[in-house]
Image (tube, rainbow, N blue to C red):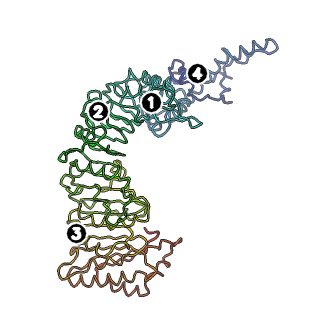
């Protein structure tokens, strides 16, 4: 212990700091520093002289001495030593603005409370920066104790605050009780600062009435001039009254599972609205289509709209057939529900060109129907008059895909990246139809329809019905058509009807599941009166070679038809044959597929090469 010990400087004098260690609430968040042996080398010079001799003092005097002033002085001295040491570290030489930004990024991807507690325990310098930076305290978790919420409100100063509340569970799986009235009381003086809300509000204990979640909902009914985004999920026993002049700057609104009272519309700045399983209490039309149309009509600046689990209320007078709600700013409109209910919505909408329309059907309502080949599928949802829906009216490229208990229909006016990337060829590639698909999967086409199939043995028989319906909703000027499904349920007459409806087809791709498509080639055969799809230039056929003849009938029939089309001066430019591994083979090997091909496949291939400019034969692995 010598005089060479470092003296205190302004760089380590934190005794006047208002940081974590002087705050009884935040103190519990900090980690306890352990005493290192190296720190003992810097103890005061007179420490040895000040140590009491045990034989000269009672045990009580020794305890008082060690636990009172001397102990505190020693801890204080060691704390200053650590602060001086930490001030030389590279990270603490960074400008405080950069360090704050690092902290801010770190808290965005973690449990911010736990991370902040650990970080504040690193050193006095970090503790002081964090405690004095309002932006590190404006993300407030309302599930924490009211004392901590109050601390966050105080330290966030005058910045905009973001409120979060998710369902919390104890160790035993019991929902954690939340003192909603206390939280609401703490927030009351800070209403003008609330900029973002994401809350799950429910009663954790049905008989515990003192929780009163409605107390927190009343906060959202107050004047919140700074609120720009609100997401609220709760139960139908709770209600929310939205008033225009209370939310003048609200842009994003998501409501789930509650009763809504729209007392004054429109919400002038609203651009994104998501409703899920909500109830509209309206004296004129309780929870029916008219109430929904009223909301859409009033919020004419909407760019994104989502309605999940929409179900029209029975017994309500229908909306006037000529009522049309224009949505001139709409970019993505998504609705899920039953076919009849969705059909009612689409019949009354007018969307701008370029708007994305996504539809998810939860049930085809095919109970009791035996004629699955004539079951309405597209016809059950889409309006026949596509004048007001350019997404249907201007389509040039269509894909129909049956796979994994889903029927997916994509349509596009332009041959976008979705078609050029061919990512949709992979098994299980079903991009989500929801409103976020345009952001998460930017190549998804403007029209996306997903039907959830019941998983019965009759699912495959819906394909002919869909093929017959395509011409009712898409223009005859279609250029690209891709179809994937079980093709042995489609007869030649259905193929002829389909190709006749779209004479301008240039690219046709058929992907057969677990079979070939020997009934298809005849539909391309020219007749004295007409040549089907005279502009067809690119044909791709994906199939499994069958055990009977390995697809020989398909290939020889195709060769005969291509000869006749060549004679009629409507030849193909490109032909792609994509041979899939057999579905029941557990281990795919190319030789296994080759063994299924007809014995004279080489001769057939040579003949086909004479009929097209480009022939491609592919042996697929795992069907992709």
Tell me the mark number nearer the camera, choosing from 1 and 2: 2
Q: CA distance from mark 3 to mark 1?
A: 59 Å
4 or 1: tag closer to the N-terminus = 4
Task: Identify the residue under disc 1.
Answer: 140
Which label is found at residue 501? 3
Q: Residue at x 40, y 86 (%)?
A: 602
Q: CA distance from mark 3 to mark 4?
A: 92 Å
Callout 4–callout 1 Cβ contact below 8 Å? no
Tell me the mark number nearer the camera, choosing from 2 and 4: 2
Q: Nearer the viewer, residue 92 or 156?
A: 156
1 or 2: tag closer to the N-terminus = 1
Would you say 176 lies left or right of 34 here? left
For mark 3, give the secondary structure.
Answer: helix
Tell me the mark number nearer the camera, choosing from 4 and 1: 1
Q: Residue at x 50, y 32 (%)?
A: 204
Task: Identify the residue under disc 2.
Answer: 262
Tell me the mark number nearer the camera, choosing from 3 and 4: 3
Residue 36 image offset from top left, x and y in percent: 66, 30
Tell me the mark number nearer the camera, choosing from 3 and 1: 3
Q: Nearer the viewer, residue 468 or 112?
A: 468
Callout 3–callout 1 Cβ contact below 8 Å? no
């Amino acid at each position: 212990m010598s005089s060479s010990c470092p003296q205190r400087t302004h760089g380590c004098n934190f005794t006047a700091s208002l940081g974590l260690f002087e705050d009884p609430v935040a103190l519990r968040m900090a980690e306890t520093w352990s005493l290192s042996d190296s720190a003992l080398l810097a103890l005061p010079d007179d420490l040895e002289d000040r140590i009491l001799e045990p034989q000269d003092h009672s045990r009580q005097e020794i305890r008082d001495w060690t636990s009172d002033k001397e102990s505190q002085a020693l801890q204080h001295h060691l704390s200053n030593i650590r602060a001086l040491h930490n001030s030389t570290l590279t990270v603490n030489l960074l400008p405080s603005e950069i360090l704050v930004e690092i902290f801010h990024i770190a808290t965005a991807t973690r449990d911010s409370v736990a991370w902040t507690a650990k970080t504040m325990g690193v050193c006095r310098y970090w503790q002081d920066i964090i405690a004095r930076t309002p932006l590190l305290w404006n993300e407030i978790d309302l599930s924490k104790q009211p004392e901590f919420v109050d601390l966050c409100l105080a330290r966030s100063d005058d910045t905009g605050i973001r409120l979060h509340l998710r369902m919390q569970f104890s160790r035993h799986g019991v929902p954690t009780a939340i003192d909603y009235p206390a939280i609401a009381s703490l927030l009351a003086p800070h209403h003008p600062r609330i900029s973002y809300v994401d809350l799950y509000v429910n009663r954790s204990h049905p008989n515990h009435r003192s929780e009163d979640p409605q107390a927190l909902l009343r906060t959202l009914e107050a004047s919140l001039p700074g609120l720009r985004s609100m997401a609220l999920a709760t139960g139908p026993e709770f209600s929310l009254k939205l008033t225009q002049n209370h939310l003048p700057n609200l842009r994003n609104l998501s409501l789930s599972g509650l009763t809504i009272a729209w007392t004054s519309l429109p919400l002038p700045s609203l651009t994104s609205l998501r409703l899920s399983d909500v109830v509209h209490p309206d004296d004129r039309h309780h929870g029916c289509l008219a109430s929904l149309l009223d909301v859409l009509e009033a919020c004419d600046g909407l760019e994104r709209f989502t309605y999940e689990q929409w179900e029209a209320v029975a017994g309500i007078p229908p909306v006037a057939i000529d009522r049309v709600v224009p949505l001139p700013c709409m970019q993505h409109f998504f609705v899920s529900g039953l076919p009849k209910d969705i059909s009612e919505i689409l019949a009354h909408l007018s969307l701008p060109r370029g708007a994305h329309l996504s539809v998810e059907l939860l049930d085809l309502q095919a109970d009791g129907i035996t004629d699955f080949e004539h079951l309405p599928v597209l016809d059950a949802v889409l309006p026949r008059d596509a004048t007001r829906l350019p997404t249907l009216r201007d389509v040039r490229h269509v894909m129909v895909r049956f796979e994994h208990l889903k029927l997916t229909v994509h349509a596009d006016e332009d041959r976008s990246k979705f078609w050029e990337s061919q990512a949709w060829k992979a098994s299980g590639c079903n991009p989500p139809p929801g409103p976020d698909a345009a952001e998460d999967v930017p190549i998804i086409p403007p029209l996306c329809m997903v039907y959830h199939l019941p998983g019965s043995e009759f699912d495959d028989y819906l394909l002919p019905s869909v093929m017959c319906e395509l011409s009712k909703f898409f223009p005859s000027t279609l250029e690209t058509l891709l179809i994937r499904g079980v093709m042995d349920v489609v007869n030649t007459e259905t193929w002829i009807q389909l190709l006749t409806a779209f004479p301008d087809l240039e690219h046709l791709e058929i992907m057969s599941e677990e079979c070939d498509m020997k009934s298809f080639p005849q539909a391309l055969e020219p007749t004295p009166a007409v040549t089907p799809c005279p502009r067809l230039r690119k044909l791709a056929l994906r199939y499994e070679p069958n055990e009977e003849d390995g697809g020989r009938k398909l290939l020889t029939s195709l060769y005969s038809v291509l000869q006749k089309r060549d004679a009629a001066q409507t030849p193909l430019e490109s032909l792609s044959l994509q041979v899939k591994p057999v579905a029941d083979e557990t281990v795919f090997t190319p030789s296994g597929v080759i063994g299924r091909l007809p014995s004279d496949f080489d001769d057939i291939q040579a003949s086909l090469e004479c009929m097209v400019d480009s022939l491609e034969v592919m042996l697929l692995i795992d069907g992709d």
